[in-house]
Amino acid sequence: MTTVEHDLLPATRRALLHRVAVAQAEGRAPSLVAAVVRGGRTVWHGARSSEDRGAPDENVQYRIGSITKTFTAVLVLRLRDEGLLDLGDPLEKHLPGTGAGRATIADLLAHTGGLAAESPAPWWERTPGTLRPELADVLGEGPLRHPVGRRHHYSNPGYSLLGAVVERLRGAPWEDVLRREVLEPLGLTRTTAQPEAPYAKGWAVHPWADALLAEPVEDLGLMAAAGQLWSTTGDLARFAVFLADGDDTVLCAESVREMRVPAAPAEAADVGDRVTYGLGLQLQHRDGRLFVGHSGSLPGFLANVTIDVDEDVAAVVLANCTSGPLTAVVGADLVRIVTEAEPRVPEPWRPLPEVDPALLELAGPWYWGTSAFALRLLPDGGVALEPLRGQGRRSRFLAADDGTWTGTEGYYAGETLRAVRRADGTVSHLDLGSFVFTRRPYDEGAPVPGGVDPRGWQGLGSA
């Protein structure tokens, strides 16, 4: 029997609407709009508004602030994949004379470049970009606040530099490159650098009275790559699908996965909160789940995209107020509501289309010293090695053309696993980065480093 996942159940939809309604009311947002994505498509949209003309739909633009950084990171990864730069390149190689040239491209993507959090006064989010016509105006004198590469320190000017790198290597404005290379291929027709009707108006809400103050809308100039974009729940839902699965017309799945790998050392306070940063993406462990995405804010607007890649569920939350609802919390709650109420139905188990007897011979238990591990064959030709009891080092390995496997995660990421055979073709042991795994604990017939006591295993009385 084939099981088909339909749209969300009525009880789930009501729970989502209730969460959005509470967020809008308690956060005192003039409007709040949200969407949920599952299985690569939008399965729910909801909104609450204080305006009599009705709630906004999935086509109304809101300013998305620092979610713009994720778009910029995609442009940089495209340059890397084309061989036009390396993430280890110092900024000076591509953009000389900034005073921050020792920071690498990867440092800037992960906010470990040591740069200041903001550009010099006046506050760049509420003033026109024309006040900062040159990169020197964005960085100011002495742009570094910390040693390069040593700590995560969020930096808006750092992404301004990345936008300038994109412009230098593409020979075109950041906005044009973004539209041509990302927005158009992904069909994000309602994501723009300038607002296009219909769009929400940005408001500040008085902290002690139910009163509104209109926020200015400024073109950020050279800071655009850090926070300029306007978008909709409809477009950001499609962008969330891309961030989960990749798209070969924009950025392959492997490079998108790289964006989701922690790339920055967490601050001491962040260790307890289990938050860190990848390459243009925020990462957080919450309630046993890994959420990836990004938040954004500019005067008058709050935004968040939250993705649970394992459960294939994402949420988008947008509001038009300077402060109020915690959109990242709301986004995570929307994802949690769906995953708890309607757990993902797994794909049917299927046997391998064919089995290599030499590979099948390696499956099963192995011992590193006295620690028991199991080697499992994966459908893609790779293998998984994991402890049989408790916690321990585990990893998946991708098959290489020479008959070895390369680790993809954890302690063994990048390390080579190989099966070592005797002269007669039988398997002697597994070698993993010099670690010897044997079929029996300290197998005397295998080249265990340090040798094996010829007296063998003994009882306490003979020890």
Image (tube, grey):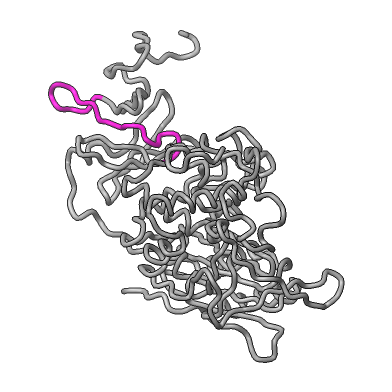
The spot of residue 29 in percent (x, y) is 72, 75
Q: Is residue 366 above or below residue 247?
A: above
Point out the residue furthest to the left here. Answer: 424
Q: Is residue 255 above or below residue 436?
A: below
Relative side of 23 to 435, left or right? right
Depth check: 414 or 424 in front?
A: 414
| Tally of marks | 0
Point out the residue furthest to the right here. Answer: 208
On the image, which quarter does residue 359 sit in? top left
Q: Residue at x 78, y 72 (%)?
A: 205
Q: Residue at x 34, y 35 (%)?
A: 365
The spot of residue 457 in percent (x, y) is 40, 15
Q: Residue at x 18, y 38 (%)?
A: 358
The spot of residue 125 in percent (x, y) is 66, 61
Depth check: 356 or 128 in front?
A: 128
Residue 447 covered by magenta stretch:
no
Residue 426 covered by magenta stretch:
yes
The N terminus is located in which quarter?
bottom left
Relative side of 139 to 72, left or right? right
The spot of residue 109 in percent (x, y) is 51, 47
Depth check: 179 or 231 in front?
A: 179
On the image, which quarter does residue 87 sit in? top left
On the image, which quarter does residue 267 sit in? top right
Q: Residue at x 22, y 28 (%)?
A: 427
Q: Which residues are magenta?
A: 409-428
Depth check: 15 or 321 in front?
A: 321
Q: Is residue 48 above or below residue 181?
A: below
